[in-house]
Image: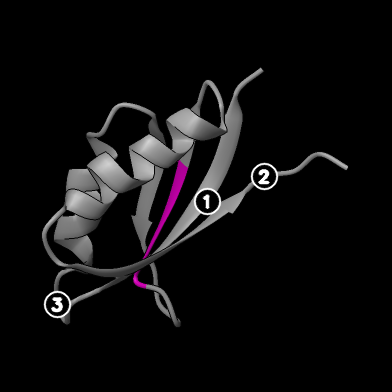
Amino acid sequence: MTVQAYILIQTEVGKAAAVATEIAGIKGVTMAEDVTGPYDVIVRAEARNVDELGKLVVAKVQGVPGITRTLTCPVVHL
């Protein structure tokens, strides 16, 4: 079973569309959209386990230019 999460991203002014487009091409990302509100981009991602998810966020997503802050929200099935 895979681990899924939403990653809420704040970007530099005017960078949301470019950030969403670049993140959409990262392996493990299933959706990336620029939105309005307190966050600029919302990403849906999946990985084999929590460790892989952490590596995806830190090594790949946070490396995209224009990102100022991320918040990872793992999906739970209660």
Q: Secondary structure at mark 3?
A: loop
Tell me the residue at 34%/71% (across/down): 40
Report if the CB atoms under discs 1 and 3 are less than 8 Å apart. no
- The span shown in magenta is 40-44
Mark 3: few/some/many CA within 10 Å (<14, 14-19, 20+): few
Q: Distance of mark 1 from mark 2, alpha carbons?
A: 7 Å
What's the CA distance linking mark 2 and mark 3? 29 Å
Q: Quadrant of residue 41?
A: bottom left
Residue where numbered disc 3 is placed: 14
Considering the whole magenta stretch, tell me its main secondary structure.
Answer: strand
The three-letter amino acid code for the residue at tag 2 is Val
Magenta-span inclusion, residue 41: yes
Q: Nearer the viewer, mark 2 or mark 3?
A: 2
The residue shown at (14%, 77%) is 14
Compared with 10, 6 (above or below) is: above
Q: Which badge, 1 or 2, comes first in the chain's sequence?
A: 1
Label 2, residues with CA under 10 Å away: few <14, some 14-19, many ≥20: few
Q: Secondary structure at mark 1?
A: strand
What residue does disc 1 label?
Answer: 6
| Residue underneath mark 2 | 75
